[in-house]
Amino acid sequence: MSASPAKPVSYSQTTLTELMIPAYANFGGKIHGGTLLSLMDKVAYACAAKHAGEYCVTVSVDGVNFRQPVEVGELVSLMASVNYVGRTSLVVGIKVVAENVKTGVSKHTNTSYFTMVAKDDTGKPTEVPPLLLETAEDARRFLEALKRREMRTDYAEHFDNARNRMLLPENIQALTTERCQLSPDLEQLLHL
Ligand SMILES: CC(C)(COP(=O)(O)OP(=O)(O)OC[C@H]1O[C@@H](n2cnc3c(N)ncnc32)[C@H](O)[C@@H]1OP(=O)(O)O)[C@@H](O)C(=O)NCCC(=O)NCCS
């Protein structure tokens, strides 16, 4: 059992709202994906550090698929909550919504999951408090995070196995329908 008492999800829920200024735009006039990633990292840190009561670092990011572009002048809100806690790691789910302030219309641009690890003053991973689940949504999110973790492990295993077979002739054949060419030197190297 953990020494620290469980903290409710609501304790660390954090929303960051920021106006999309022209300096954030790319050459196409839309907001840089990297700007949104940086804001997501910020809000994930605030949420994770509040739950952990410690300094936290970002370990991995899942589910960054920008479904719609964000425009200059829109008000972007990033809503973060702790979805899952392990021993020293936590998963922060972040929903990103962009609002056109003139029309009041909002669009959901993405939901992403940041895995953060709490560190002690010496830089070692340190235990985080358990999570108190108070609503059905809290429980659903915790279960979804477990499922994502299980699927990530399966994927990593499958990919490692597949990677070991990548240069077999049957896999090389798959390249014939792709938009690439093998140089004569490479063909010779692969004995084709
Ligand atoms: C993440 C880090 C602390 C892991 O260190 P480690 O010595 O491997 O520690 P552990 O194996 O005990 O892992 C600590 C936790 O991280 C989790 N973890 C490690 N790698 C992970 C990954 N790729 N994805 C998800 N979780 C991961 C472990 O499952 C463990 O969680 P748990 O305690 O809840 O079970 C270390 O790799 C690190 O400091 N990385 C740099 C992070 C950083 O600086 N980020 C900022 C970007 S520059």
Image (spheres, rainbow, N blue to C red):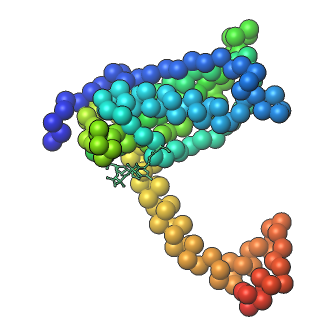
Q: Nearer the viewer, residue 51 or 22?
A: 22
Q: Using the image, determine if residue 154 lies above or below residue 43.
A: below
Relative placement, left or right, of 183 versus 138 is right
Q: How many marks do you count on the picture?
A: 0
Q: Nearer the viewer, residue 8 or 186?
A: 186
Image location (x, y in percent) of residue 87: 28, 45
Q: Residue at x 41, y 23 (%)?
A: 13
Q: Is residue 117 visible?
A: yes
Residue 166 location, quadrant: bottom right
Relative placement, left or right, of 9 versus 187 is left
Q: Using the image, determine if residue 65 lies above or below residue 71.
A: below
Q: Residue at x 37, y 30 (%)?
A: 49
Image location (x, y in percent) of residue 95: 54, 29
Image location (x, y in percent) of residue 36: 63, 31
> On the rendered image, what quadrant is the C terminus found in?
bottom right
Q: Residue at x 61, y 18 (%)?
A: 18
Relative placement, left or right, of 56 versus 63 is left
Q: Nearer the viewer, residue 59 or 94?
A: 59
Image location (x, y in percent) of residue 54: 32, 32
Residue 85 location, quadrant: top left
- Judged from this view, the residue extending furthest toward the top is 102
Q: Residue at x 47, y 55 (%)?
A: 152
Q: Is residue 138 visible?
A: no
